[in-house]
Image: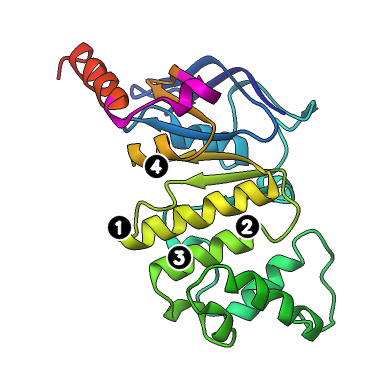
């Protein structure tokens, strides 16, 4: 489904600080996979997501999506088939709008905007049904401004919004990192339910090794712009957090730490 072919990504090109993170990097994801991506800071995890979403341009190489070359496709056009939930709960919704207004905008993601009312009364019950599944009482707060919600509530809303339309790829960029432990657990449970029910292909970057081990059907560890560990299916299911910690320790020793 997704193919990154011979990707080169440089930062600070043409300056004394020029660095090459990806040097002819290749990576592929099959349809329906839920991939957990771990790695130290600077390993290329978030850069990989930004390249897929179009937030960053590639310097060389190709990005194929279902065989279609999207290498130079603008970010807003990719958003028609890619949903993304960010680490910062404030980035997934508009604080000054109500829950209802945020959901109405997301509902029109693939449509055209005109001068008709943005919120359709016929869709309100549908929105309530989606929010009820979060178990946070959001369905009773449709007229409340999103800025007044807690971080966990906003991330739950961001998950609902990201999955409202028929997306082909869900990107989760450390989406539990800014939450307290209880909210993190709740959001991961919601994430797993959405992914399983929709069967949507998912890439999740996380620093939580337990979440990486417990969720998804593929685990990838990155280091210095390379995939150094990749386990799928039964091999992934047998992994323990200790296995990843051991690998992190080996990398740390190799790097002189």
Query: Is 152 located above or below residue 141 in the figure?
Result: above
- Viewer can see residue 207: no
Residue, disc 2: 162
Mark 4 surroundings within 10 Å by alpha-carbon count, few (fewer than 14), some (14 through 19), many (20 or more): some
Residue, disc 3: 90
Q: Secondary structure at mark 1?
A: helix
Mark 1 surroundings within 10 Å by alpha-carbon count, few (fewer than 14), some (14 through 19), many (20 or more): few
Which numbered disc, 4 or 2, marks the residue closer to the eye? 4
Separation of marks 4 and 2 at Cα, in angstroms? 20 Å
Q: Which residues are magenta?
A: 230-242
Tell which circle, 4 or 1, labels the residue nearer the N-terminal end.
Answer: 1
Q: Secondary structure at mark 3?
A: helix
Query: Is 100 located above or below residue 179 in the figure?
Result: below
- Whether residue 85 sits left or right of residue 88 in the image: it is right
Residue, disc 4: 211
Which numbered disc, 3 or 1, marks the residue closer to the eye? 1
235 in magenta: yes
Q: Are marks 3 and 4 in contact (CB under 8 Å)?
A: no
Separation of marks 4 and 1 at Cα, in angstroms? 12 Å
Tell which circle, 3 or 2, labels the residue nearer the N-terminal end.
Answer: 3
Residue, disc 1: 181
């Amino acid at each position: 489904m997704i193919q990154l072919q011979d990707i080169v990504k440089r930062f600070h090109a043409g300056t004394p600080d020029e660095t090459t993170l990806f040097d002819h990097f290749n990576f592929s994801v099959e349809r329906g996979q839920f991939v957990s991506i771990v790695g130290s800071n600077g390993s290329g995890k978030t850069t990989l997501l930004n390249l897929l979403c179009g937030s960053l341009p590639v310097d060389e190489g190709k990005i194929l999506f279902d065989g279609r070359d999207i290498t130079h496709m603008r970010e807003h056009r990719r958003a028609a088939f890619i949903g993304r939930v960010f680490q910062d709960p404030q980035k997934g919704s508009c604080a000054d709008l109500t829950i209802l207004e945020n959901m109405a905008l997301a509902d029109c993601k693939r449509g055209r905007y005109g001068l008709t009312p943005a919120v359709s009364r016929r869709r309100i019950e549908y929105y309530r049904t989606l929010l009820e599944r979060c178990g946070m009482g959001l369905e009773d707060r449709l007229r409340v401004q999103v800025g007044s919600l807690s971080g966990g509530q906003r991330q739950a809303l961001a998950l609902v919004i990201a999955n409202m339309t028929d997306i082909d790829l869900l990107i989760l960029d450390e989406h539990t990192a800014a939450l307290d432990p209880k909210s993190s657990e709740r959001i991961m449970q919601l994430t797993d339910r959405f992914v399983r029910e929709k069967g949507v292909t998912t890439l999740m970057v996380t620093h939580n090794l337990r979440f990486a081990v417990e969720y998804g059907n593929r685990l990838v560890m990155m280091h210095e712009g390379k995939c150094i560990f990749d386990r799928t299916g039964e091999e992934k299911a047998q992994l323990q957090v200790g296995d990843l910690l051991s690998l992190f320790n080996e990398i740390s020793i190799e790097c002189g730490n």
